[in-house]
Image (spheres, grey):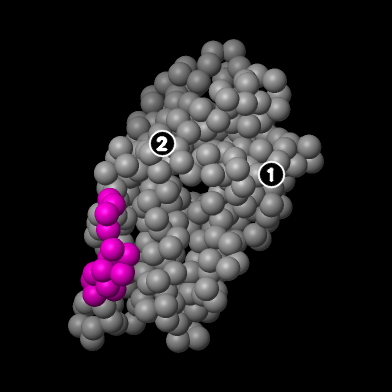
Amino acid sequence: MEEEKDRLVVLIGPTAVGKTKLSIELAKKLNGEIISGDSMQIYKGMDIGTAKIKEHEMEGIPHHLIDLKNPSEEFSVAEFQELARKAIASITKRGKMPMIVGGTGLYIQAVLYDDYQFSDIQSDPEIRKELENFLHEHGNLALHERLQEIDPDSAERIHPNNARRVIRALEIYYKTGKKMSEHIKTHEANERYHTAIIGLTMDRDVLYQRIDKRVDEMIEEGLIEEAKSLYDSGVRGVQSAQAIGYKELYDFFDGKASLAEAIETLKKNTRRYAKRQLTWFRNKMNVKWFDMTPPVSMEEKVSEIFHYIAGKLLSEKK
């Protein structure tokens, strides 16, 4: 029965498109609470580089799944799925509207669909060691080719340069005999919630300019110092150290790049990430897109999106 499903608003889009500001305005109208859909905002002390919302920007709207872990800890998709679903249930119970806001597609998708099963497969040190040695000797393209042979679907989704995820996909296959893509098959028929998925998009050139400007602002705000304190506390070789905004500066701290080069690489990586986010959301989710290319009236946009959500979720019929 459709009506028995909990309602959920999802607001997605590439980095720097303007999700944060709009989410607050929407939450006010919807009597909502916000669940962060960004896999790196879970980490304490990583505020500037993850563009984490500041206390005063929340304007009293409760936020969930922010600052729960230390940067030295891992955070799996399965764990995110569990925490987000608990938050949705608790927000709904209090008569509020749960809203997931963020850009980590894989994590958000895991919450929305019921058959999104990952056996929470533990890492296997021996298999992992073998794969890391192979990577070391033959490089990331050869490693990616191994994945291509056994699991072309995952290989298509994971960039060869993302060696960490390539290793994870191979590890899952060697450990379980099932492809990662089989573990994460999703079907819209199995939507867990009655969902309105809103996507924000923007002219690519304008978005890229905004990204470059945002990186400059992050540097001014103290990103270098924030990354250095992680670096100095020995946070290395873990998930958080792979975050865009930190790994580039680690190269600078390691003496592998000048500061100017590190900042340029950070801008380039963020632009690429935004492009991948847009592609991913377009391919994987049933999204209603709204164009945020300036000049745009925030008030009108919020009203337009609110009416769409009201039509989809707040009316009696499906």
Q: Which element type, helix, strand or loop, lies under badge 1?
A: helix
Tell me what residue is drawn at x 37 percent, y 79 percent.
29
Q: Which element type, helix, strand or loop, lies under badge 2?
A: helix
Q: Main secondary structure of the magenta part?
A: helix
Residue to which mark 1 is pinned? 226
* 234 or 129: nearer the viewer: 234
Q: Where is the C terminus found, in terms of image quarters?
A: bottom left
Q: Does residue 280 appear left or right of residue 51 in this picture?
A: left
Q: Position of residue 82 (x, y in %)?
A: 54, 64
Q: Position of residue 171 (x, y in %)?
A: 55, 35
Q: Position of residue 127 (x, y in %)?
A: 62, 30
Amino acid on which disc 2 is placed = Arg
Vertical side of 111 occupied by 279: above or below: above
Q: Where is the N terminus found, in terms of image quarters?
A: bottom left
Q: Quadrant of residue 309?
A: bottom left
Vertical side of 239 occupied by 302: above or below: below
Tell me what residue is drawn at x 54 percent, y 44 percent.
217
Magenta range is 293-308
Residue to which mark 2 is pinned? 271
Q: Does residue 220 appear left or right of residue 94 in this picture?
A: right
Residue 276 visible within the image:
no
